[in-house]
Image (cartoon, grey):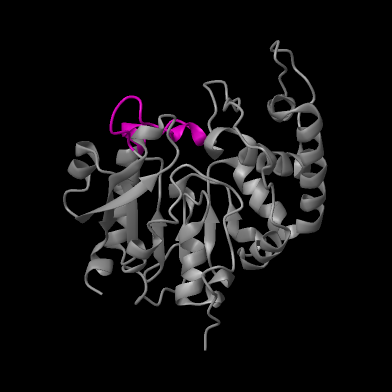
């Protein structure tokens, strides 16, 4: 019998724009009765759906799951959580002291390898860089990951009196629950070749913006209309191959148009990552279902 995890057993290590913790109960309705050979998440982000897969379908799925993201720093962090949580915690604690002594912008400059005068400086590398990502994420404005056109992290400081950087017990649990190292990948979403009939793939791509000011897609790279159409074509290809496919995206007319041949549901998410407090709240999103998911 599959080991069932309690809902409070693991929490995301990062606060991530577009995280799915609030929407998990609605998405779960479309995979809770499936028995996939493998689970694949090409846009992993904070991983809320993956951890619910383990809770709902059984912890044995960590042995075959593939998690992927195009953000190299994010994937390096997960690899370090998996392979060396003790050393990662050591660096997190040291960098928290640096944060308390020198401030947020000291860490941000070393993360970018660029000081306030745009001069090159030695940047964080290796496991220390992963620790810096955690500390910066927990102390920046709204926990947002955003880079500018030159690839430099540019989120300002958040307002925190005594931020909790890392939960040691939770990090060790994450280390245990993550897939094996070779299945923690950094590829383009359509470069994952080992997806077969009967597998379950959940896509949570950078959302197509509802308007010109609503996009937070800079966490990875440019993901515009051409990339959205490429993703739709890949979604369709997997669907036609008998793969169980589910995709989240914004409720924009463009997304509704390109996925018009599939079942599209409108669900509502609370979005906390918005610079204007009065604009936070329930926002409609699309959940798009492949044929085998609809027919279960």
For residue 177, what is the image quadrant?
A: bottom right
The residue depicted at 45 percent of the width and 38 percent of the height is 273
The residue depicted at 37 percent of the width and 74 percent of the height is 32
**Magenta stretch contains residue 149:** no
Predominant secondary structure, magenta span: loop
Q: Vertical placement of 268 versus 70: above or below?
A: below
Query: Image check: 196 left or right of 158?
Result: left
The residue depicted at 37 percent of the width and 69 percent of the height is 197
- Count of numbered circles in the view: 0
Q: Vertical placement of 245 versus 228: above or below?
A: below
Q: Residue furthest bottom?
A: 1
Q: Position of residue 243 (x, y in %)?
A: 34, 65
Q: Vertical placement of 146 versus 137: above or below?
A: above
**Magenta stretch contains residue 223:** yes
Q: Vertical placement of 187 versus 239: above or below?
A: above
For residue 24, what is the image quadrant?
A: bottom left
Residue 84 seen in the figure: no
Give the magenta-colored segment's residue range.
208-227
Q: Position of residue 97 (x, y in %)?
A: 81, 38
Q: Residue furthest front?
A: 161
Of the 4 image quadrants, the one containing the C terminus is bottom left
């Amino acid at each position: 019998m599959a080991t069932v995890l309690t809902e409070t057993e693991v929490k995301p290590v990062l606060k991530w724009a577009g995280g799915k913790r609030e929407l998990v109960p609605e998405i779960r309705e479309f995979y809770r009765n499936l028995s996939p050979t493998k689970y694949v998440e090409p846009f992993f982000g904070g991983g809320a759906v993956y951890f619910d897969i383990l809770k709902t379908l059984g912890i044995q799925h960590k042995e075959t799951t593939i998690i992927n993201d195009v953000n190299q720093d994010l994937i390096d962090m997960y690899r370090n959580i998996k392979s060396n949580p003790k050393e990662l915690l050591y660096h997190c604690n040291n960098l928290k002291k640096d944060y308390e002594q020198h401030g947020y912008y000291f860490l941000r400059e070393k993360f970018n390898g660029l000081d306030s005068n745009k001069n090159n400086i030695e940047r964080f590398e290796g496991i220390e860089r992963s620790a810096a990502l955690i500390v910066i994420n927990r102390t920046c404005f709204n926990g947002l990951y955003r880079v500018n056109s030159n690839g430099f992290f540019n989120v300002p400081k958040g307002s925190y009196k005594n931020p909790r950087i890392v939960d040691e017990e939770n990090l060790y649990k994450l280390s245990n629950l993550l897939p094996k190292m070779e299945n923690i990948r950094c590829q383009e979403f359509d470069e994952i070749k080992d997806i077969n009939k009967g597998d379950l793939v959940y896509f949570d791509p950078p959302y197509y913006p509802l308007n010109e000011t609503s996009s937070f897609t800079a966490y990875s790279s440019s993901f515009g209309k051409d990339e959205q159409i490429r993703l739709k074509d890949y979604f369709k290809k997997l669907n036609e191959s008998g793969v169980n496919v589910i995709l989240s995206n914004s409720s924009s007319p463009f997304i509704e148009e390109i996925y018009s041949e599939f079942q599209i549901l409108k669900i509502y998410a609370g979005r906390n990552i918005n610079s204007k407090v009065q604009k936070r709240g329930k926002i409609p999103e699309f959940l798009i279902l492949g044929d085998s998911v609809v027919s279960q």
